[in-house]
Amino acid sequence: MDIAEGETLIEYKGEVIKWKEALRRHPHNPKEPNHTFFFSIDDKHVIDGNVNGNSARWINHSCKPNCEADEKKGRVFIKALRNIQAGEELNYDYGLVIDEPYTAKLKADYQCLCGAKKCRGTLLAPKEKDERDAKSESTKRKRKGKRKSNHKK
């Protein structure tokens, strides 16, 4: 069945927790320290898709996505950005936000393998020039969006 542009496909479900608890739980798997199912919904709360989550947590990242995450009143819905053909993989831009300078190592830790022509090479959201030049005082990693392993299907 084809999916129409603008259609809501699924809600990203999981336990809603405070960032302090998310940082305590991180990483879900010590062998993959950058792989989480956290989805930031505001500065204080995050959805942990690893607890009571659903299949939305398995949607992959792409730098040329066919879906987007739409946050409304503390809930996250995955919506189609364009018409999607039956059998086409669903994906959205994770746009991870981490409150520290984007070093080469950090970008490599969050390497993107989506294969899009204009792939950024990282799952990290682009930083504004003034943010890149400013030094971050925070050492906490706050993620906007979710993170999963870099494996391809």
Image (tube, rainbow, N blue to C red):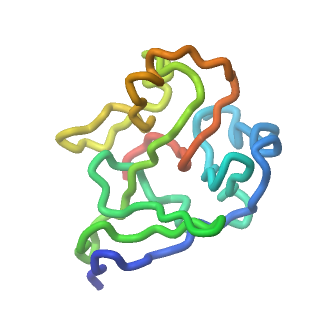
Q: Quarter of the image holding residue 150?
A: top left
Seen from the viewer's position, the closer of residues 132 and 22 is 132
Image coordinates for residue 74, horizontal then vertical, percent? 66, 65
Image coordinates for residue 3, horizontal then vertical, percent? 30, 79
Quadrant including the N terminus = bottom left
Seen from the viewer's position, the closer of residues 126 and 49 is 126
**Apparent side of residue 70 relative to residue 2 in the rendered image (left or right):** right
What residue lies at 64% left-to-right and 50% top-to-bottom? Answer: 38
Report the residue that reaches farthest toward the bottom: 1
Residue 116 visible to the viewer? yes
Image coordinates for residue 97, horizontal then vertical, percent? 53, 37
Residue 54 visible to the viewer? no
Q: Considering only vertical position in the picture, is 38 above or below 11?
A: above
Image coordinates for residue 46, horizontal then vertical, percent? 69, 52
Seen from the viewer's position, the closer of residues 84 and 126 is 126
What residue lies at 70% left-to-right and 37% top-to-bottom? Answer: 27
Report the residue that reaches farthest toward the front: 130
Q: Quarter of the image holding residue 57?
A: bottom right
What residue lies at 45% left-to-right and 44% top-to-bottom? Answer: 95
What residue lies at 72% left-to-right and 66% top-to-bottom? Answer: 52
Q: How many marks?
A: 0
**Apparent side of residue 138 relative to residue 150 in the rendered image (left or right):** right
